[in-house]
């Protein structure tokens, strides 16, 4: 079963069955056995068509319930096994024949709210009645709590800001803008704020939704000529959290409405938390007045994970998984290996662990280094860093308007020396080259020069936001 959890175009019912078994195994750890037996086991994975997974539930009620409460969970579990999956369709199937499509969910987006009243589900945060029809928050993932968020240097400020919002709610920093690369915990922190407020201030009207859902609701309001209700609903919340705000870049009328909603809430001293994949001033297609408002409060960058944080996250997640699967034996070296080899984002790291546990449970094998390499061969291959020192030199030279010959020259003028240090720093971060190899790539310099460059840039990043931003931009361009 080297590639046993891969599903190809020629998937057989047996392949799909094996994938579904793995989903059931990982769901037991996350949702509990009873919940899985009651809701997930009766559902079947019917087909995978390109980026779409089609799952079938036996009744309309079940399909609806699953979509509302477990859609996001199932999407994420399937993504962990088959990273190409972006959407999930829950269909109703009697016998083998599907009879109706209930929903299509986009990747990593919580289930779209429906106009009719919902049954109370374990992950939806109910919003008390507001003027007109009550607005309902998008579902919160029950796993995304502060307890389960591992704090390290790269995310400590973001974590502290999120805690502050959740615990004081005094809008002293307004808005709080969290930004960072894919899968670094922005959504997790926003959900954690929602969970905390639901527990400590159940009467607060907390609305969490993605920017895409904001647009969807706005478009619906336009369609049904009911923008007054839309305005009233959004302006009557106590805490508004909008995830992935970059989605509305280039969408002018949605931005206009967002701008007015934003101002109205800030005027009322209501807390706003927003997340994005880059800092506000780098959001092309976002109106300048919105960019500047996004920077009014506290702007916090979640940095890419470092080895220690990745290891901490893996240990926490592995402990939780082991508690739900006491038969599985895990060699601790595997966690170190994964933390070292998979540095792209936490979602991929989690997916790797889920896959290992599912594999171990299915075939009854101990999770050791051999098994890990066998089971994750595709993931490990694609995680191999592909950026070369030449790519880095080229990008850095373009950015700082230097010639390639400058960066490898002996020149020590600051205008050349600093970009050279930036390039060495990026080479250390983005390639697997050793220090002497990096030194050789920069005109035959000694490895101690590289160490000095890396240290210097780390220090400067902490005090010079412009430099930190330049480096982040270069990193993203190189990894794109
Ligand atoms: N510090 C952390 N501790 C524990 N889990 C984490 C941490 N950071 C991220 N994760 C986990 O990684 C996964 C991805 O995180 P999340 O969805 O919050 O990322 P994101 O920054 O919102 O990404 P995207 O830009 O794709 O929306 C989640 O399962 C989350 O629980």
Image (cartoon, rainbow, N blue to C red):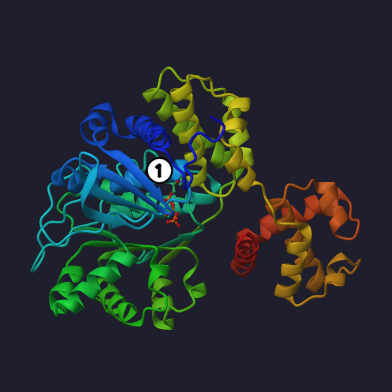
Locate the C terminus by quadrant: bottom right
How far across and how far down the image is residue 324, in percent? 37, 25
Could you tell whether 264 is left or right of 465 in the image?
left
Front position in the image: 330 or 153: 330
Residue 297 vertical position relative to residue 15 in the rendered view, above or below:
below
Could you tell whether 407 is left or right of 241 in the image?
right
Hey, which quadrant is residue 235 in on the image? Answer: bottom left
Q: Please rate how many residues cluster around mark 1, counting C-alpha atoms within 10 Å: few if below 14, some from 14 to 19, many from 20.
A: many
Residue 117 vertical position relative to residue 474 in the rendered view, above or below:
above
Please, which residue is most extreme toward the top here?
327
Front position in the image: 51 or 304: 51
Residue 470 vertical position relative to residue 314 in the rendered view, above or below:
below
How far across and how far down the image is residue 271, in percent? 28, 63
Residue found at x 52% / y 41%: 349
Residue 150 visible within the image = no
Hey, which quadrant is residue 294 in on the image? Answer: bottom left
Front position in the image: 191 or 109: 109
Residue found at x 38% / y 37%: 13
Residue found at x 73% / y 62%: 422
Q: Name the residue under label 1.
A: 78
Mark 1: which secondary structure? helix
How far across and how far down the image is residue 100, in percent? 20, 53
Could you tell whether 110 is left or right of 10 in the image?
left
Could you tell whether 276 is left or right of 331 in the image?
left
Hey, which quadrant is residue 16 in on the image? Answer: top left
How far across and how far down the image is residue 377, in percent? 61, 37
The mark total stands at 1
Front position in the image: 217 or 180: 217
- Ligand 1 is within 8 Å of the C-beta of the residue at disc 1: no
Residue found at x 34% / y 56%: 109
């Amino acid at each position: 079963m080297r590639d046993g959890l891969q599903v190809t175009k020629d998937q057989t019912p047996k392949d799909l069955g094996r994938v579904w078994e793995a989903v059931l195994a990982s769901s037991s750890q996350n949702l509990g056995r009873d919940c899985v037996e009651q809701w997930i086991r009766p559902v079947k994975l019917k087909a995978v068509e390109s980026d779409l997974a089609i799952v079938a539930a036996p009744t309309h009620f079940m399909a609806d319930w699953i979509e509302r409460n477990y859609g996001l969970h199932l999407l994420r579990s399937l993504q962990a096994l088959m990273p190409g999956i972006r959407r999930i369709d829950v269909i109703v199937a009697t016998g083998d024949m599907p009879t109706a499509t209930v929903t299509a969910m986009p990747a990593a987006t919580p289930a779209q709210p429906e106009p009719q009243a919902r049954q109370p589900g374990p992950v939806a945060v109910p919003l008390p009645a507001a003027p007109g029809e009550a607005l309902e928050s998008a579902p919160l993932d029950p796993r995304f709590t502060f307890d389960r968020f591992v704090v390290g240097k790269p995310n400590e400020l973001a974590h502290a800001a999120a805690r502050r919002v959740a615990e004081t709610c005094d809008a002293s920093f307004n808005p709080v803008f969290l930004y960072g690369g894919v899968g670094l915990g922005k959504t997790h922190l926003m959900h954690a704020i929602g969970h905390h407020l639901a527990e400590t201030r159940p009467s607060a009207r907390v609305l969490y939704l993605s920017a895409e859902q904001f647009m969807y609701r706005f478009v619906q309001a336009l369609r049904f000529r009911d923008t007054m209700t839309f305005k009233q609903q959004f302006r009557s919340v106590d805490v508004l959290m909008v995830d992935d705000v970059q989605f509305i870049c280039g969408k002018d009328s949605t931005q206009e409405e967002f701008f007015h909603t934003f101002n109205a809430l800030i005027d009322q001293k209501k807390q706003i938390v927003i997340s994005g994949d880059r800092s506000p001033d780098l959001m092309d297609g976002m109106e300048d007045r919105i960019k500047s408002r996004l920077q009014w409060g506290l702007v916090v960058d979640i940095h890419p994970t470092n080895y220690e944080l990745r290891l901490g996250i893996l240990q926490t997640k592995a402990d939780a998984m082991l508690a739900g699967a006491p038969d599985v034996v895990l060699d601790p070296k595997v966690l170190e290996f994964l933390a070292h080899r998979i540095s792209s984002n936490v979602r991929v790291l989690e997916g790797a662990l889920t896959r290992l546990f599912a594999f171990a449970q299915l075939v009854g094998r101990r999770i050791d280094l051999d098994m890990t390499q066998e089971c994750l061969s595709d993931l490990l291959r694609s995680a191999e860093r592909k950026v070369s020192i030449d790519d880095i030199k080229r990008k850095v030279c373009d950015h700082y308007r230097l010639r390639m010959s400058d960066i490898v020259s002996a020149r020590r003028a600051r205008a050349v020396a600093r970009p050279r240090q930036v390039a060495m720093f990026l080479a250390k971060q983005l390639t697997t080259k050793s220090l002497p190899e990096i030194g050789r790539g920069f005109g035959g310099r000694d490895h101690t020069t590289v160490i000095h460059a890396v240290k210097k840039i780390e220090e400067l990043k902490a005090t010079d936001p412009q430099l930190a931003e330049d480096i982040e931009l270069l990193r993203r361009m190189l990894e794109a």
